[in-house]
Amino acid sequence: MLKRSFALLWLSTQWICGASAASPPKLVVVIGLDQFRYDYLTQFREHFGEGGFNKLMANGATFTHATYKHALTLTGSGYAVISTGSYANQNGIIANDWYDWKSRKIVYCAEDRSVHPVGALSGASSPVNLLVETLGDALRSSNRKSKVISVSKKDRSAILMGGKQANGAYWLVDSVFISSTYYMNSLPNWVEEFNHSGIVNSYFGTMWDKTLPDEAYALMDKDDAPYEADRNGVGRTFPHRISGNDATRLTASYYSALQTSPFGDRILAAFAEQSIMAESLGTRGVTDLLWIGFSSNDYVGHSFGPNSHEVLDMVVQTDRLLADFLDSLNSSVGLTNCIVALTSDHGVAPIPEYLIAADPNTPAGRVRPQAIETWCNVTLTARFGTPKEPWLDAIVSNNIYLNRDALLEKGLTPEDAARVLVDSLNGKKEVAAAFSRGQILALNSTAIVERRMKNSFNETRSGDAVYALAPYYFESDETAGTTHGTPYDYDAHVPVIIMGAGIRRGTYSSEASPADIAPTLAVILGVSFPVGRGGSVLTEALK
């Protein structure tokens, strides 16, 4: 048995060495599509061309069962998983926001008050809150000549992908791409030139109309559903005028409207292509890494929901954008010299009212955040009496943070009060599971929801109690639109596709995760795994 184990170890070592011994790619491009469910690839595939999603799936390794293994399926936590191969219990990014015990304030995941924005008056952000390495950090540690560039509309997307050693992370604020003094003291000339080109404002007044024939939208919900959200003057029905709330002049609402359309991603693609040319990515004799976080699918999905005409059209437009981008990449670097990986930071929940309209008996709905706070206060007061200080410091991203002064007054430990809270929450139909800090740390469950909740729990940043709402329920003060952030597969099941030299093309149904992308690419690049990674190497995808 000992000899057999040694032989297996030797063979696996030789396989890993062989996988990384081939010539490394000149450029690795990781594409993140914000709020993009896996089933969009199958549901809408008949409308795709040959050069976008179909090109990636035909020539790459496609994992059909790739899911996030965490509960808080949000942008910050999702991109941290993609770039590091680890979950919040290791990387610290439990959500987009959390409560900080020391400052007694809510902290944004990319917040850093020690740095300043570069290129704008606001937007000072950095990866200081990320506790582990990214793939880019591992690449730069291996070879300082390698460049890591990260671009997105959202600062948290660009920063958490790029990591701490990126040569540049850029995000869009109104009409300009900016960065922070964490990365640089001034914007490169090529970024300044792009900002002065006027491309962002050039879409003012543009009409977003349907791309496909009317009959193609028959499988979707009606175009003018009352539970779709009309935000920033975009309207609920096609065609959508992209002007914001004032059709006569540029206002801040225009920039939000722009992102709620395919044009927002077109601008980012142009910026990414410019970064490849200006930074000479993939043409300098070393391996470079480019992260791209497209955001418009997220804005469209939030407003109109996954069953809308708008989401179908947005996915089709994304397919065409990818085709154009891959053609550009082939011209500038050559696809045979590249590895291209595509995934998403999370999916999206169906609009509850859409489900109820189809079947009035469907358990689904919106839970007001104030209602959860009221449940907690009523429960603790009924059990322990009214304290002088509020019972709660905050409820943020399904984490309940108890006020230490109130607990001290009542002679309670945080765990005592948290146990009372979770017992009450677990009795409500809208709640699937709730745990105290002690319970979640001791949890050793094979249940999917519970395992995902534990992976989202960080001892330093998570609350005294955590909860997950029942399927098809989510927190919202609005009466239209939808969101994400739950441990269920409509939020967790996303594409994972890797294409390029050294990749064994095919469709694989084995269990996978976006957390597997970073370690798999690390093997291909021949660099160390990012410190703290929990993802696995997708061995079936490697030649």
Image (cartoon, grey):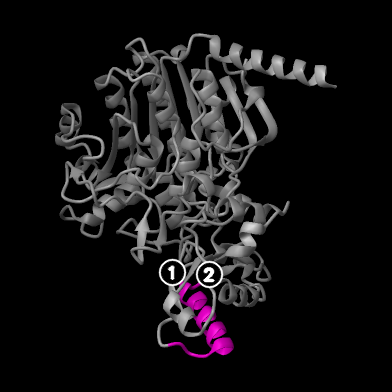
Residue drawn at x 49%, y 19% as measured from the top left: 525
Quick check: 355 left or right of 195? Answer: right
For residue 413, above or below residue 537:
below
User: In x, y percent, where is residue 327?
Assistant: 40, 20
Element assignment for label 2: strand
Instruction: Tell me the quarter of the picture where residue 105 sits.
Output: bottom left
Instruction: Tell me the quarter of the picture where residue 2 sits.
Output: top right
Residue 242 seen: no
User: In x, y percent, where is residue 428?
Assistant: 64, 75
Q: Disc 1 or 2, which lies upstream in sequence? A: 2
Residue drawn at x 72%, y 54% as measured from the top left: 445
Residue drawn at x 61%, y 17% as measured from the top left: 16
Crowd class of label 2 (few under 14; some 14 to 19; many from 20; radius 10 Å) = some
Element assignment for label 1: loop
Q: Which mark is residue 207?
A: none
Residue under label 1, please give it: 478
Quarter of the figure with the N terminus: top right
User: In x, y percent, where is residue 152?
Assistant: 34, 39
Residue under label 2, please give it: 366
Toward the right, the furthest residue is 1
Q: How many marks?
A: 2
Q: Say what amino acid the circle numbered 1 marks.
A: Glu
Identify the main secondary structure in magenta: helix
Distance between mark 1 and mark 2 Cα atoms: 8 Å
For residue 407, above or below residue 504:
below
Q: Say what amino acid the circle numbered 2 marks.
A: Arg
Quick check: 362 left or right of 75? Answer: right
Residue drawn at x 48%, y 36% as measured from the top left: 84
The answer to whether the residues at label 1 and label 2 have Cβ atoms under 8 Å apart is yes
For residue 220, above or below residue 519:
below
Quick check: 482 left or right of 152? Answer: right
Give the residues in magenta. 366-387
